[in-house]
Image (cartoon, rainbow, N blue to C red):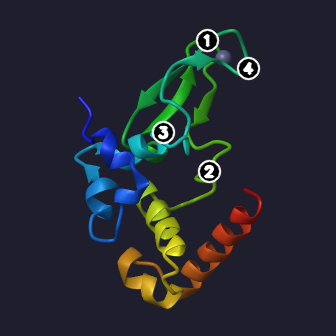
Amino acid sequence: MTLVSRNDYDLSNINLINFHSIIRTEGEKIVGLEFCVNHRLLPPIISHDCLYCDGLMKPRFQARYKFGVRFGCNKCEKVINISQDTWFFNSKLDIEKNLLLIYLWTMKIPANKVGPAVGLNKNTITDWFNFIRDVRRFI
Ligand SMILES: [Zn+2]
């Protein structure tokens, strides 16, 4: 069962009022994770060939994993974080805060106004906004 309809993925439907209802954590299920996979910000959560051997990497779900899931090989036991090679890899923030910061940056909300919404100080937000701006230059 999916928690969000296809229309919820239409980015034009997102505004600051409904942001949290679309990108939210429901119990142990992170809707933001599904959102990111559907928008190709994270890889599909399906089994795939192992990068290190001829085994199969399968998704493993546990709350303690970053974003609640990672891939593990059934043969060589190597583990890959779902965020590897993505925007989120080095981020210590959860998906919701990552997406919220990107959204607020696109809305041109000044860093000093963003703090209360995301619970981060102005300097951290300024660093994030600079990072987003730098990444955007290469997209
Ligand atoms: Zn392997």
> Of discs 3 and 4, which sits in the foreground?
3
Nearer mark to the viewer, of 2 and 1: 2
Q: Which mark is residue 52?
A: 4
Q: Quadrant of the C terminus?
A: bottom right
Pointer 4 with pointer 1, Cβ within 8 A: no
Q: Nearer the viewer, mark 1 or mark 3?
A: 3
Label 3 belongs to which residue?
A: 37
Question: What distance separates the C-alpha of mark 2 from that of mark 3?
Answer: 14 Å
Quadrant containing ligand 1 reads top right
Tell me where residue 76 appears, x and y as whole percent: 65, 16
Within-10-Å neighbours for mark 2: few <14, some 14–19, many 20+: few
Q: Which mark is residue 89?
A: 2
| Disc on the earlier residue, 2 or 3 | 3
Q: Amino acid at mark 1?
A: Lys
User: Residue 138: which quarter of the image?
Assistant: bottom right
Frontmost of labels 4 and 2 is 2
Residue appearing at x 34%, y 58% in the figure = 13
Q: Position of residue 85 (x, y in %)?
A: 68, 43
Q: Which mark is residue 44?
A: none
Ligand 1 within 8 Å, label 4 CB: yes
Q: Position of residue 61 (x, y in %)?
A: 40, 32
The first of marks 3 and 4 along the sequence is 3
Mark 2 CB within 8 Å of ligand 1: no
Amino acid type, callout 3: Val
The residue that label 1 is drawn on is 75
Q: Residue at x 72, y 14 (%)?
A: 53
Query: In the image as oriented, which residue stretches furthest toward the front?
Result: 12
Label 2 or label 1, whichever comes before in sequence order: 1
Q: What kind of residue is marked 4?
A: Tyr
